[in-house]
Image (tube, rainbow, N blue to C red):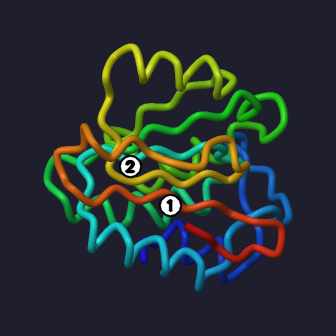
Amino acid sequence: MNSVLEQILATDTVKTPAGESLPLHSHIEANGGAFLQNVITQVKPKVSLEIGLAYGISALFICDALATLPTAHHIIIDPFQTISWHGVGLNNLRTANFGAMIDFREKFSHSALAELVEAKTVIGFAFDNFEIFSAIRVGQAENPIAMCCHRIPDSSLAF
């Protein structure tokens, strides 16, 4: 586990880019994060997608696992990262040295997903914090296994 994620989970706080401490909430628990990492280790996606960033906890778990794959990158969509989450999620990812791995889109998912479809982006793994979509088009995937996980209200995960 990267040191940024370790510190956040140990203290139940996050820091804004300006250094202000905020209480941690609306995040995936450690066991859910470990589950996502296990799925990524098995699927080995070149490209992953996450809808919803918030404080970046699930993205930190995901990028931690993706870092073991040589050319993997993570697309993140969240129109509210700046106005509602004070840039904390992006700041956490950059502090953990995952900045080069991420493609952040501060747009609504219907717009960002349409752009990905138009670009014929192949997604090998997706994590949906808001249940925006329920399936990944597997037929075009370079890896025959494509996985989509959803976060549901009780913080458990579903396929």
Is 110 left or right of 113, judged from the image as shown?
A: right
Q: Which of 95 and 85 is in front in this view?
A: 85
For badge 1, the amino acid type reads Leu
Q: To which quarter of the image does residue 8 belong?
A: bottom right
Q: Which quadrant would residue 22 be assigned to in this image?
A: bottom right
* Rendering coords of residue 126 (x, y %): 47, 51
Crowd class of label 1 (few under 14; some 14 to 19; many from 20; radius 10 Å): many
* Residue 83 in picture, x, y percent from top left: 82, 28
Q: Which residue is drawn at 52% across and 18% down?
A: 114
* Residue of label 2: 98
127 versus 117 height, above or below: below
Q: Residue 60 carries which label?
A: 1
Number of marks in the image? 2
Question: Mark 2 touching mark 1, by CB under 8 A?
Answer: yes
The secondary element bearing badge 1 is classed as helix
Seen in the picture, residue 159 relative to 53 is either above or below; the reply is below
Q: How far across and down, in percent of the image, does residue 95 sit?
A: 48, 51
Left or right of residue 121, residue 148 in this image: right
Q: Out of 29 and 8, give the one closest to the viewer.
A: 29
Q: Quadrant of the N terminus?
A: bottom left
Please name the residue shown 66% across and 44% down the image.
52
Residue 97's place in the image compared with 106, above or below, is: below
Q: Is mark 2 on a helix, strand or loop?
A: loop
Q: What residue type is labelled 2?
A: Phe
Residue at figure coordinates x 42%, y 32% from the top left: 103
Foreground residue among 100 and 15: 100
Location of the C terminus by quadrant is bottom right
- Which residue sits at x=75%, y=66%? 152
Disc 2/disc 1 C-alpha distance (Å): 8 Å
Q: How crowded is mark 2: few (under 14 residues within 10 Å), some or many (20 or more)?
A: many
Q: In this view, does 14 lie to the left or right of 146?
A: right
